[in-house]
Amino acid sequence: LSAETSHDFIEWCGLLEGQQENEKLSVGIQINRNEVYFDFINEYPDYAPKSKMTISRQRFYKWLHAYAEFKTGLPAIEGRDMIGRWIRLQEPEEEAPL
């Protein structure tokens, strides 16, 4: 994940040791893509537009997909509703006992 994203993104996701996971990135819930983008750039202003490490929405969404695959081992599901575009981390399926 660190090769595809940035240390700040990993920290924001709550993947560093001793950190609480970001509740907005929970598995199985619809996450408004725009909302989490603004949440990230508010917490890390260096990534805001016209900043030294600016990140486009498209690149940030690729980071979200990389996080989803890292977290669950499955690709994220995308969709759209009245509010806007969303992404959902799939829940890993329970293995059926033999």
Image (tube, helix red, strand yellow):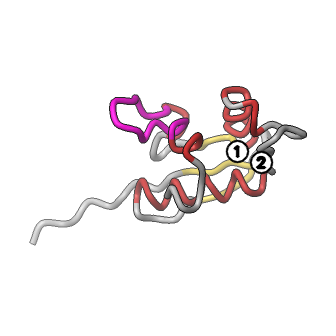
- Classify 36 as above or below 81: above
Q: Secondary structure at mark 2?
A: loop
What segment carries the magenta color?
A: 11-22
Tell which of 90 and 4 is nearer to you. Answer: 4
Q: Residue furthest bottom?
A: 98
Q: Residue at (72%, 40%) from the top-left corner?
A: 37
- Which residue is the site of mark 2? 55
Which is more N-terminal, label 2 or label 1?
1
Dot 2 surroundings within 10 Å: few (below 14), some, or many (20 or more)? some
Instruction: Specify the amino acid type for callout 1.
Output: Arg
User: Foreground residue, 80 or 1?
Assistant: 1
Instruction: Provide residue 93's location: percent of width, then percent of height.
Output: 33, 61
Which element carries disc 1, helix, strand or loop?
helix
In this picture, residue 86 sits left or right of residue 26: right
- Residue 51 in percent (x, y) is at 84, 38
Q: Residues within 10 Å of mark 1 (few under 14, many from 20)?
A: many
Residue position marked by numbered label 1 in the rendering: 33
Which residue appears farthest toward the right when viewing the image? 50
| Residue situated in front as seen by the camera: 41 or 78 | 41
Establish if 40 lies above or below 90.
Answer: above
In the displayed structure, 92 sits above or below 85; it is: below
Quadrant assignment for the C terminus:
bottom left
Q: Main secondary structure of the magenta part?
A: loop
Give yes or no for residue 57 being in the magenta stretch. no
